[in-house]
Image (spheres, helix red, strand yellow):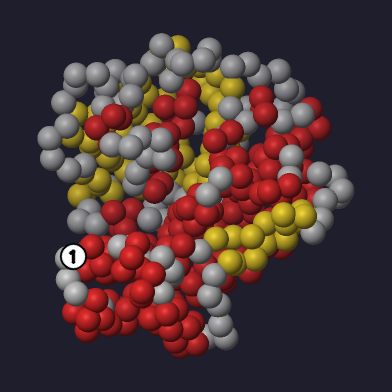
Amino acid sequence: MKVKSIALTNFRNYSFSETSFDDGLNIVVGKNAQGKTNLLEAIYFCAIGKSLRAVREKELINWDKPVAKISLEVEKKFGKTRIDITLNRVGKKIVAINRLPIRKIGELMGELNAVFFSPDELKLVKESPEDRRRFMDISISQTSKQYFYLLGRYSKVLANRNKLLKQALSPETIKDTIGLWDEQLSSIGAKLIMYRVAFLKNILPFARLSHEYLTEGTEELNLEYAGITGEDEAEIKTKLLKQLENSLEKDMRLQFTSVGPHRDDIKVWVNGIDIKTYGSQGQQRTVALSLKLAELEIIERQTGEKPILILDDVLSELDEKRKKRLLAFCKKTQTFLSCTDFNYDVPHKTIVVDRGSIV
């Protein structure tokens, strides 16, 4: 899988720019605040159908312009695909594949598989469980549209259960009604957990290899799903249902659902130490990068296509040894790497960004 070209119209600080890419390492270079990250963001947007940076998509539209557009061409084993995303200040975004608008964003999943890493991804290890759940959800969704749709269904059922908990009803009325939502939440939740546990089981060997590679064999990484698990989906559903029932009194006081896969986490250890609590920032950054590099391997094995790798301002955060090891790893797949300058003797294409233009 290779991104061949991109065109941006009124996206972030770009008025109009277009460029083609090399199949190997693409270095996006320029001074700070010129638009390097915006270019990488646009590429990743075409993979997952949303921005990781913008709270509202209207923020992606340049100044007072009414519309922004991304047009990207990707080449896969069995032909080329064109992805067009149009963002409007009024109305919903329009996503088209080969010029045909899609009805659901899930139809975009798998058209372009990408792994994104930036210094902000340190929160994958350091910050809240929500960041680690997002990592799993985005990665699994790129290889399973079924998982993506399950996430949407779970969110809707969860919202309905929380709405019931917030209503000014008697405890008896809530208890008589909430069983409907508990049944659905435990059923869908069990399926989500099965996907997540399988994902961690599959990614762990590759994450260990990547981590060993980056640390020159001095550290051992371990991962574990922190939540309800079981031998099969039926057992997990039974446990989830019981957990929801046991937490009902607490949930009525809090007015939201306090248990379930939307609260689960990943435990991360290095050499037997809880890296989130006791690891140095350098260790946490290496773990986060190891997980992202392992994600590349998992996606390729499940789809038969090499995903692209997007690295935003990563070199400035690594020591010299890790920089060279990362650049060597980049030979495995098409890579987009942004930086203010690049002085390494490796084959690459340079794309210069200056004041919202590709020059």
Question: Which residue is rendered at x = 55% and y = 77% of the image?
Answer: 229
Instruction: Please identify the quarter of the rendering in which residue 246 is found.
Output: bottom left
Residue 213 x/y as whole percent: 79, 47
Q: Is residue 135 left or right of residue 201?
A: left
On-image quarter of the C terminus? top left
- Front residue of 149/189: it is 189
- Front residue of 7/219: it is 219
Residue 2 x/y as whole percent: 50, 43
Q: Which residue is mark 1?
A: 167
Question: Which residue is rendered at x = 41% and y = 11% of the image?
Answer: 355
Instruction: Please identify the quarter of the rendering in which residue 38 is found.
Output: top left
- Front residue of 269/137: it is 269
Residue 21 x/y as whole percent: 49, 31
Q: Is residue 59 left or right of residue 288?
A: left
Q: Amino acid at mark 1?
A: Gln
Q: Is residue 314 left or right of residue 46?
A: right
Any part of residue 144 in sight: no
